[in-house]
Amino acid sequence: MKKFLKIFAFSALFFAGASIFAKDEKTQPDTYDYDITVTSIKGVGAPYISGNYIVFTAKNDCRSVGLAVDFENYKTIHQFHLHKTYDSEGEVTDSWFFYLLEKPRNTETISYRLIIDGLWTTDPSNPETAYDYKNGLLLSSFTLPPDTKIFTENTGSGLTHFVCLAKSGQTIRLGGTFTNWDSWIYEMKETREGVYEIDLPLPSGTYYYSYYTGITSFIDETNPLRGYSADGRVVSCINVD
């Protein structure tokens, strides 16, 4: 009997550990988009959108560069990273500072300042500026393209609003853990050219999902949260309150 209880306890512990591992694996952050965006930066210039990020760059002619933005009340300084390019012999050919800022939601224009070697200043690579009359400061400004204001979100009315940005005229479907990964239950509606939408009544919880066209699945580019499916695919994730 004691031997049986020991085997049972070991088995329970083993399967509990496997369950925890699977949970951790699903919520493991995916850095693929970030890494691809970093390698796509070609040099210093005005800010621009790449995937889920706003790309900021600065010349490598100082010790440090930071970024402070208006929607954080300039309370957080995001430190830039140094990027170097090399030739075939391993010699440095160029270098610059960069920072990738996740696109804020419900925001049309961002005002910001750079902190270069401790001095607050406008972005010398960005001609767009805005004047803060309250504090008497000249700020750098960046206007987000219209399609970045359309995104998957909880509407607060018991519905989760899914958005897919894709080529117009396709049949786009939605599948995830809420359909047991059956992608043939929900077909999205093209509400305007290249924008597909659907509302689902999802109870509170964390869900993983993908969009589908034919047999091809792809992530939600309007939602930066990622996870892994049971078969190891990178999928989108949303938390419903």
Image (cartoon, grey):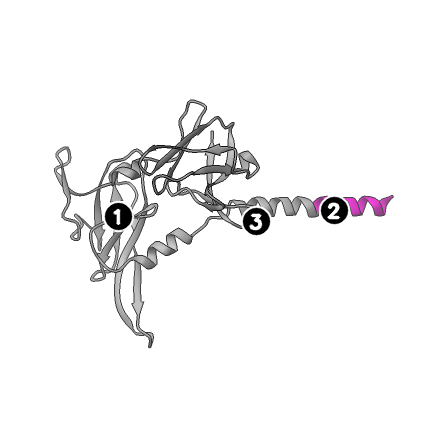
- Helix, strand or loop at disc 1? strand
Callout 1–callout 3 Cβ contact below 8 Å: no
Q: Nearer the viewer, residue 127 or 196?
A: 196
Q: Residue at x 21, y 45 (%)?
A: 113
Q: Which residue is mark 1?
A: 67
The amino acid on which the numbered mark 1 sits, given as a three-letter code, is Leu
Mark-to-mark CA distance, 1 and 3: 39 Å
Q: Which residue is mark 2?
A: 11
Counting residues from the start of the chain, the first of labels 2 and 3 encountered is: 2
The amino acid on which the numbered mark 2 sits, given as a three-letter code, is Ser
Binning the other alpha carbons within 10 Å of mark 1 as few (below 14), some (14 to 19) or many (20 upward) gives many
Q: Residue 83: which quarter of the image? A: bottom left
- Helix, strand or loop at disc 2? helix
Q: Position of residue 176 (x, y in %)?
A: 52, 38
Q: Which residue is mark 3?
A: 231
Q: Position of residue 131 (x, y in %)?
A: 13, 38
- Queried whether the magenta region covers residue 172, the answer comes back as no
